[in-house]
Image: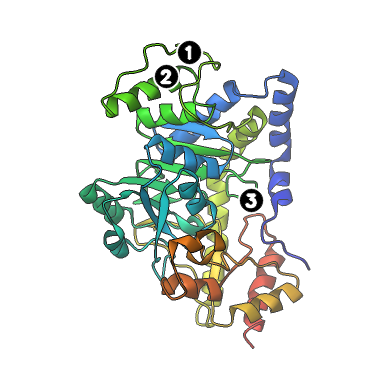
């Protein structure tokens, strides 16, 4: 038996006829960039998550970059975030010229520890970039209170959390903006790359819309005027003005979600609650089966609703268990073996081993097992059996 950690093929097969019909419709239309499918998906996903505005883009990394840029974050600024996440979170901060400031995570939820945020605030701090990790929700009440107290923007990295809830709300825009990835393995994944920024702020949405297409057009001009007004400066008098894509007002990017991906995502969105329910059922089953075995099973935040993009177990003998499971046909994931504060790309920041003890412990002792909703009964039983056997 060979059980994949993420089975994208099986996910596709579940509703293959609908996904393929949607893609074929776009291919036959000849409209591959922008258009009604993209606009409809932006509107539908924003409505699903409870946001006023949705701005699609090329991938989740770009979504974070666009959001940071839209809030004017750049050179000389600091953004507080976690080291226990995928590289793109902090990479995006560095990409706009700002510096990531790493704080540790909670030992139970693996999300940012709100009690450590205030101590990391300096006069250079402009934002907190928190991560709904593995599909678990951060403690948004406390984080929002801290950001309000220090006049900081709150940007959420929701790359792993489509369908996650907080206080029973499916509203990942509990911050000023939230950034999603639609990478194929995600709970809501396309057949390539894709991302989106959600926000309730019109000016942020307009800035993101312009920045993703080379800083051009009506939204680019509007955003440029806003930026000049904030600096109390006059627009250049000799500047050519127009609203087409050939008038560029900001240094932006080429980051678009194509129509084929949007059409597929629109279909998948109608099943997202089903996907989340399936993951939660599998997680609950594993939690019950592994109770008292020595594994630390995932903890759902008091006010959260875990969507279980990842089902991670913790054990001091993690590496031995991973090897045993793999030898017996069960794929495992190590998310993430090298915390960001110890990555070579961030050595200039001066962090050293021991600075973030919880993060460093989790990097050695946690591992993921399959939780995707399309697993067969015999596969679930086998996973539990092998997890228990690995401890003998």
Across the whole image, how many numbered discs are drawn on residues? 3
Q: Residue at x 59, y 36 (%)?
A: 58
Q: Where is residue 121 in the image (x, y as percent from the top left)?
A: 28, 56
For residue 266, side relative to residue 353 (left or right): right
The location of residue 287, given as percent across then percent down, is 52, 71
Tell which tag, 1 or 3, sits nearer the viewer.
1
How far is disc 2 from disc 3 in space, using C-alphas? 37 Å
| Other residues around mark 3 within 10 Å, as few (<14) / some (14–19) / many (≥20) | many
In the picture of the structure, the residue carrying the numbered disc 1 is 243
**Residue at the left extreme?**
149
| Residue nearer the viewer, 97 or 384 | 97
Q: Which is more N-terminal, label 1 or label 2?
A: 2
Circle 2 or circle 3, nearest the eye: 2
**Residue at 37% over, 47% down:** 76
Q: Name the residue carrying label 2.
A: 221
Residue occupying the far bottom of the picture: 392
Mark 1 falls on what kind of element?
Answer: loop
Disc nearer the start of the sequence (2/3): 3
Pick the front one: 117 or 137: 117
- On the question of residue 124 being in view, the answer is yes
């Amino acid at each position: 038996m060979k059980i994949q950690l993420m089975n994208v093929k099986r996910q596709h097969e579940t509703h293959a006829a609908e996904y393929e019909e949607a893609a074929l419709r776009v291919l036959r239309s000849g409209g591959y960039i922008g258009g009604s499918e993209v606009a409809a998906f932006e509107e539908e996903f924003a409505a699903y998550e409870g946001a006023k505005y949705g701005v699609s883009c090329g991938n989740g990394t770009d979504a974070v970059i666009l959001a940071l840029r839209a809030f004017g974050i750049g050179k000389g600024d600091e953004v507080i975030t976690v080291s226990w996440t995928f590289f793109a979170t902090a990479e995006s901060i560095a990409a706009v010229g700002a510096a990531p400031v790493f704080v540790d995570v909670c030992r139970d939820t693996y999300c940012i520890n709100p009690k450590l945020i205030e101590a990391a605030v300096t006069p250079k701090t402009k934002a907190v970039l928190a991560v709904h990790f593995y599909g678990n929700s951060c403690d948004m009440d406390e984080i929002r209170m801290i950001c309000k107290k220090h006049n900081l923007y709150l940007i959420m990295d929701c790359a792993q959390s489509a369908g996650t809830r907080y206080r029973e709300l499916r509203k990942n825009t509990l911050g000023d903006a939230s950034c999603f990835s639609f990478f194929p393995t995600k709970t809501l994944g396309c057949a390539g790359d894709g991302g989106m920024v959600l926000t309730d702020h019109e000016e942020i949405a307009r800035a993101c819309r312009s920045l993703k297409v080379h800083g051009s057009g009506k939204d680019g001009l509007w955003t440029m005027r806003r930026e000049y007004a904030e600096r109390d400066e006059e627009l250049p008098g000799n500047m050519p003005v127009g609203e087409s894509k050939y008038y560029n007002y900001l240094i932006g990017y080429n980051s678009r979600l194509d129509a084929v991906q949007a059409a597929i995502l629109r279909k998948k969105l109608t099943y997202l609650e089903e996907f989340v329910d399936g993951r939660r059922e599998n997680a609950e089953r594993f939690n019950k089966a592994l109770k008292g075995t020595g594994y630390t099973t995932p903890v759902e935040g008091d006010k959260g609703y875990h969507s279980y993009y990842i089902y991670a177990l913790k054990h001091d003998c993690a590496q031995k268990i991973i090897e045993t499971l793999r030898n017996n046909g069960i794929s495992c994931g190590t998310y993430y073996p090298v915390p960001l504060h110890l990555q070579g790309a961030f050595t200039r920041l001066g962090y050293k081993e021991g600075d973030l003890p919880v993060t460093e412990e989790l990097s050695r002792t946690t591992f993921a097992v399959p939780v995707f909703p399309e697993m067969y009964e015999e596969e679930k039983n086998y996973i539990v059996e092998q997890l228990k056997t690995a401890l003998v």
